[in-house]
Image: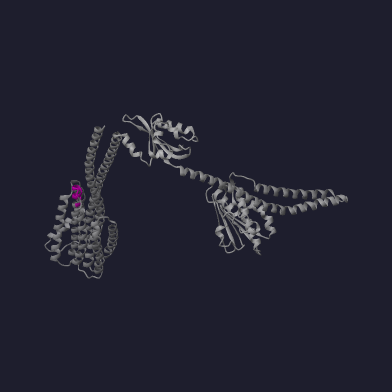
Amino acid sequence: MENKLQEKTKLIVSMLALVSILIFLAVVIIEAYYSKINSLVVLNEQIALSRDISSLIHSLQKERGLSSGYVTNSNGKFKIEMLQERIHSDKYVKNLLEKFKKTECNKLKKEKKRLQEKLSSLYSIREAIDQHKYQWNEVIEEYSKINTFLLDIIIDIAKTSHIPSITQNILAYSYLLYYKEYLGLQRAQGVILLSSQSFDKESFTKFVNLMAISEQNKAIFLKYASEPLQQYYFKYTKSNTFKKVKEIETKIVSTDQKTYKVQAKEWYNLMTKKLNIIDKISKHIEKRTELLIKKELYNAKLFFFIIILVLVASWFLFIYVMLHLLKLIKNEQRLRLVMDKYVISSMTDLKGNIIDVSQAFCDISGYTKEELLGKKHNIVRHPDMPKEVFTKLWNRITQGKSWSGKVKNRRKDKSSYWVYANVEPLYNANNEIEAYISVRMDITENEVLNQKIKAEEERNKLQEKIMQQQHRLAQMGEMIAMIAHQWRQPLSAITAASGAIMIKASRDRLSTEQAVELAQKIQDFSKHLSTTIDDFRNFFKSKKQKQITNFQQVTQSVLAIVDGSLVRNNIEISCKYDNVEDFISYENELKQVLLNLIKNSEDALNERDISDKKIEIYVQKRTLKIRDNAGGIDESILSKIFDPYFSTKMKKDGTGLGLYMSKVIIEEHCNGKLQVQNTTDGALFEIDLGESDD
């Protein structure tokens, strides 16, 4: 056994060494590709910026040519186009500065300040041009400084690429932009040359030099351009525009008289068309470069994630093998790590005989190890536990599944305790069940506490029922008083009618018509009494099923009961209904709440002897508000009025349950809210049943 353990330990050490090497190599590869991905992301951002820079350069080239023409031609034929091009340039400047603010590239962030300084100088150049402070050569020089700075940024971007195909494309793109820049200078110089009234040797020399530099940059561009790019270039440069420009260049260079029959504006327009074509080619290169970057980025990410997945899968495989090997080292050794003095655990054979227990198990059960070993595990079973629980337990664990649940056990001294047990099978090397292990957690305190909570809940429910009954009895007392009042008048009328019948009949003066009329009155008053009885009986009928109702219906039903009492006490009650909505709730309980609120207002108005007594009820959708002008509730007790047995009517035998039970009914039974606040004239109670009928 010891030799096998040593062999397995050596195998584990070897595997650890191999996995460590593989992880190291994987980390190196992951780091390399992660760095490549980051560089490609940054490069892609830089290419997007270079596109914006290129657009700005193109616009500034036009602005330079138009500005030089404007300075040279005092009649201002270039002015309108120059001002329009300035608007375009400003748009590109704003866009470029916003992009530089958002860039994550540290190198470009450093260029931000210099870029702002360069671009801000553009406005001083324009001001000098407008004030005719610059000569044509100064105009070209100032604009060229800005463009050269912008082109240098693009060249710096080309240096950050480490992928040959992308680097080649960016270099080709850079030299094409330089070619375009010198064409722009050539355009501006040509405007100067053709606008001169006499031959200017300096302008002529500069023009010829610019032609040579442009061709040189074009040759370098074609050198770096791939074959498809060259084909794309030659496709668009075979146009008539390039031929006409070449013809004018030949005339300018070869003429002896140094007089040119070409208008400066014609030259400017032709060169602008040529530059637009070159700009179109540069945009094509931008798109191809972005596609190349995206392709490289996709491949790098794909390989990166594949490496990650392989590494994770290898790690999981290694963990699985390690766990399997550790399991095979010794089940006994693994079990000893579990069976410490803090864990209530036991192990049985396939027949349920105890073969091992922890000290914690002995401590909680009161038995010693010697008393438990070899005994059936049901030695600690409590008689209160149903047999079905253990039948289900054995069915699961014999099928190789685990079982969990609460178990009530019995100690040696016959006292009880509760545990949460988890039982599962143990397997041997042949993957056969050889024993069952159970780990328990003492939950006796929790169970005792739960039992106390349940008992307390039952007591609370009973107390609430008693309080509700007391509340109903109090309301019934008030109802009986109202019934007595409402019956007085009909009973008096019935007595008067029956007396009239008796007197007239005794004197033989009762006609048939009079008898019918008086009998009809007695019948009408009797119906009124019967209706009153039905109203009060329905009010207290126990309907615990929810039904469709609304606050208008509830209000009208309650007012039919209390109207006589309010009239007797000279209380004016007004109701307003706005967009009344039906809802599903306990209608009778809502009636009891509204009745309680109305009676409270009535009592307050009578107690304070208000001269102009008013109660207002306002219903909007599923909200009911009731307000009186009794002066409100003392702020010192406002927060306590919903407490049980708290009453402001103690001297008048108030129970202190009306508002408490109203709160319970609305918020616990009807899932709504009952709130109160003081207004200028009195108290305002609000019942809000929300938007749902849950």
Q: Is residue 373 above or below residue 504?
A: above
Q: Is residue 144 above or below residue 532?
A: below
Pinpoint residue 199: horizontal percent, then vertical percent.
14, 66
Pinpoint residue 381: horizontal percent, then vertical percent.
46, 34
The colour scheme applied to this rendered structure is one colour
Question: Where is the N terminus found, in terms of image quarters?
Answer: top left
Pinpoint residue 286: horizontal percent, then vertical percent.
24, 51
Q: Which residues are magenta?
A: 162-170
Outermost residue on the right side: it is: 507
Question: Residue visible at 78% across and 49% down?
Answer: 520
Locate residue 379: give its quadrant. top left
User: Is residue 613 visible to us here?
Assistant: no
Q: Is residue 408 above or below residue 51?
A: above
The number of callouts visible is 0
Question: Residue visible at 80% across and 52% down?
Answer: 497
Say left or right for 521 vs 366: right
Question: Residue visible at 22% across and 51% down?
Answer: 281
Pinpoint residue 119: horizontal percent, then vertical percent.
25, 63
Front in this rendered view, residue 378 or 375: 375
Outermost residue on the left side: it is: 256
* 164 in the magenta segment: yes
